[in-house]
């Protein structure tokens, strides 16, 4: 579980996040929505320690991040960055890097690490590409491998920054279903998305940010009722019922 | 289980690659000792190396001239190739290499200053070269950090840094002409007149730096995933980048201190090895060490036999190989084939 208390953060002289207080519960898929520059990615980066907080408090499983070393933090929260390098290594090796926070000198992997990496590959649906070089994989397959690496990190929470970017529709849906499977296993998944329909369909909780402040927080139904998406994005979000539940569209 | 079997097969293929590299290094070293103005039989070489012959003319030729030269080739090739691999990985830039980003010229400048101040302090050369190389690499790192430099900007800043160091070097030579002795050989790079006394201090610096790089190979792997991913995995990227670049500078600086400013080894070898063994750092560093040793030794052989009895400095051969290689890389980058 992640708890933010009056969190402030920014870059240089620019304040990006102001007084953010939120709780990300275990077993939930939480989606951060907001226009470009609203502070969604900054929020994730600040939680994971890539960006210094200016004030407030971040608690990971009840422990303040100030009391955690980078490795201890990495054992509690995994992060899938938006921009990544793709080294010319095989996918299994890539996933094994998720075990880095647990390695002590001389950084050799044990059978337990290999077992966890295999399980992560299977859970992420990437077992069939385990031996393939990363460079030869499609963007969708790579995303599965990165997700497997985050799973191998064996953390209670996983943060994903725009994970559906560059994915076709089928791979986007697969990724969302996979995120739901992870929450079913008790993990807390926090995701930055730009696709409002995907967020409304799959999220357990939606947080809407604008200018570094929380404008709305609730279930998709509550968010729809509040009309906060309409006012923040300047669109009209509509809903219609289908046999598989409510669907949303905007114009 | 199927996946593991495939894994072992690939592992088998890699073992063959290492075997070929070791054989290349051994054959290059043996040829380098046998070939010269006088051909010495491999049997005679073995007798000398095993200590059974220490007094014949052949033993003198081997022990005083050819063995130091061969060891110098192996050591310089190893150090420059590993230095290039580390710099490319840390800066995430396939065009970065010790000579391209000004590391060699920084080391060269420091060596010239050291020669001007204390011409007889042979043992100080590797450390002066290390200081110069470190200064160069930190300058380039500062530019990269400050500007978020693109791959091409980094190369261009290397050109600028190189020209500044060359200007300082020329200024030192102008004021202290004695420092010029042997400087033209040093600038081109070569192994003529190398002695074990000159090689000794550099050997220890290179050995220590190489072992440290190997011990940090897993960290280097994680660093190559990108700053954000590496930090999120609990890696302290800033100090690690500095340590790795300092080790790369030590390797290049120590090599430059006795071989002169050999170019392109740190560019050609890591590129080829990345294609062959991939980017697992432990495997990359080991294969670069072997590949670099073999390349420089073979190029030195070529330089000795190509226009025999005249001898070319090996730096010319390496530049003739490396220049076109670099142009091909630039063209491929323009076509977007290098990330």
Image (spheres, coloured by chain):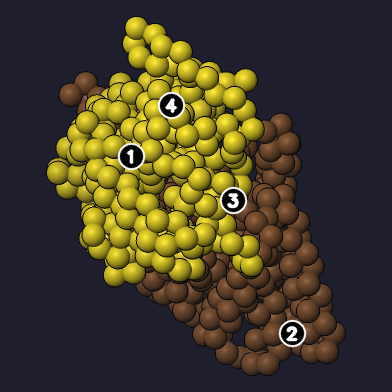
Q: CA distance from mark 1 to mark 2?
A: 65 Å
Residue A211 image label: 3
Mark nearest the camera among 1 and 3 is 3
Q: Chain of mark 3?
A: A
Q: Which residue is mark 2?
A: B179
Task: Please give left or right for residue A151 compared with residue B96 in the image.
Answer: left
- The residue sitting at 41% across, 74% down in the picture is B204
The quadrant the C terminus of chain A occupies is top right
User: In terms of depth relative to the viewer, which is nearer, A141 or B277?
Assistant: A141
- The residue sitting at 37% across, 21% down in the picture is A174
Task: Provide residue A22's location: percent of width, then percent of height.
Answer: 37, 52
Q: Which residue is mark 4?
A: A200
Mark nearest the camera among 1 and 2 is 1
Colour of chain B in the rendered structure image: brown
- Badge 1 vs badge 2, beta-carbon distance below 8 Å: no
Q: Chain of mark 2?
A: B
- Badge 1 vs badge 4, beta-carbon distance below 8 Å: no
Dot 1: what SS? Answer: strand
Along the polypeptide, which appears first: circle 1 or circle 4? 1
Task: Provide residue B103's location: percent of width, then percent of height.
Answer: 63, 66
- The crowding category of the residue bearing disc 3, from other C-alpha atoms within 10 Å (few below 14, some 14 to 19, many at least 20), is some
Q: Chain of mark 1?
A: A
- Badge 2 vs badge 3, beta-carbon distance below 8 Å: no
Along the polypeptide, which appears first: circle 4 or circle 3? 4
Q: Chain of mark 4?
A: A
- The crowding category of the residue bearing disc 4, from other C-alpha atoms within 10 Å (few below 14, some 14 to 19, many at least 20), is many
User: In terms of depth relative to the viewer, which is nearer, B35 or A21?
Assistant: A21
Task: Report whether mark 1 lies on the same chain as mark 3.
Answer: yes
């Amino acid at each position: 579980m992640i708890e933010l208390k009056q969190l402030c953060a920014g870059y240089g002289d620019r304040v990006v996040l102001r007084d953010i207080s939120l709780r990300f519960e275990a077993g939930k898929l939480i989606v951060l929505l907001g226009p470009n520059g609203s502070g969604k990615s900054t929020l994730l980066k600040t939680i994971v320690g890539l960006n210094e907080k200016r004030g407030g408090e971040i608690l990971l499983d009840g422990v303040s991040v100030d009391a955690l070393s980078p490795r201890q933090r990495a054992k509690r929260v995994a992060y899938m960055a938006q921009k990544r390098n793709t080294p010319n290594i095989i996918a299994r090796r890539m996933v094994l890097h998720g075990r880095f926070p647990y390695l002590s000198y001389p950084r050799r992997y044990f059978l337990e690490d290999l077992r966890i990496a295999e399980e992560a590959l299977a859970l992420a649906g990437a077992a069939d590409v385990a031996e393939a070089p990363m460079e030869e994989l499609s963007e969708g397959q790579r995303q599965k491998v990165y997700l497997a690496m985050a799973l191998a990190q064996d953390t209670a929470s996983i943060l994903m920054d725009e994970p559906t970017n560059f994915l076709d529709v089928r791979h986007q849906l697969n990724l969302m279903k996979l995120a739901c499977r992870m929450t079913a296993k008790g993990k807390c998944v926090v995701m930055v998305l730009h696709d409002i329909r995907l967020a409304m369909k799959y999220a357990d909780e939606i947080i809407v940010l604008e200018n570094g402040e929380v404008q709305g927080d609730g279930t998709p139904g509550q968010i729809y009722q509040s009309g906060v998406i309409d006012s923040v994005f300047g669109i009209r979000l509509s809903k219609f019922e289908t046999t598989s539940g409510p669907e949303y569209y905007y114009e | 289980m199927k996946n593991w079997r495939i894994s072992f097969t690939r592992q088998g293929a890699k073992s063959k690659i290492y075997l070929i590299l070791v054989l290349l290094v051994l054959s290059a070293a043996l040829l380098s000792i046998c070939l010269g103005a006088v051909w010495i039989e491999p049997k005679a070489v073995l007798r000398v190396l095993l200590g059974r012959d220490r007094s014949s003319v052949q033993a003198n030729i081997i022990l005083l001239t050819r063995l130091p030269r061969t060891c110098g080739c192996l050591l310089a090739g190893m150090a420059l190739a590993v230095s290039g691999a580390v710099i490319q990985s840390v800066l995430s830039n396939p065009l970065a290499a010790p000579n391209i980003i000004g590391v060699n010229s920084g080391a060269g400048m420091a060596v010239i200053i050291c020669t001007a101040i204390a011409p007889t302090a042979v043992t100080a050369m590797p450390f002066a070269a290390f200081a110069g190389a470190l200064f160069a690499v930190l300058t380039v790192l500062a530019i990269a950090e400050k500007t978020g430099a693109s791959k091409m900007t980094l190369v261009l800043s290397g050109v600028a840094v190189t020209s500044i160091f060359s200007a300082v070097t020329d200024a030192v030579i102008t004021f202290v002409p004695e420092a010029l002795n042997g400087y033209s050989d040093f600038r081109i790079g070569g192994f003529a007149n190398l002695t074990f006394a000159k090689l000794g201090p550099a050997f220890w610096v290179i050995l220590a730096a190489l072992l440290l790089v190997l011990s940090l190979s897993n960290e280097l792997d994680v660093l190559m995933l990108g700053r954000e991913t590496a930090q999120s995995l609990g890696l302290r990227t800033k100090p690690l980048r500095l340590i790795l670049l300092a080790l790369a500078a030590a390797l290049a600086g120590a090599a430059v201190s006795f071989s002169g400013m050999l170019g392109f080894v740190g560019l050609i070898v890591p590129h080829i090895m990345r294609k062959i063994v991939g980017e697992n750092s432990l495997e990359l560093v080991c294969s670069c060490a072997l590949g670099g040793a073999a390349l420089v030794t073979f190029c030195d052989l070529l330089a000795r036999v190509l226009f025999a009895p005249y001898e070319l400095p090996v730096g010319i051969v390496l530049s003739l190989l490396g220049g076109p290689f670099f142009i091909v890389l630039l063209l491929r980058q323009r076509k977007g084939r290098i990330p």
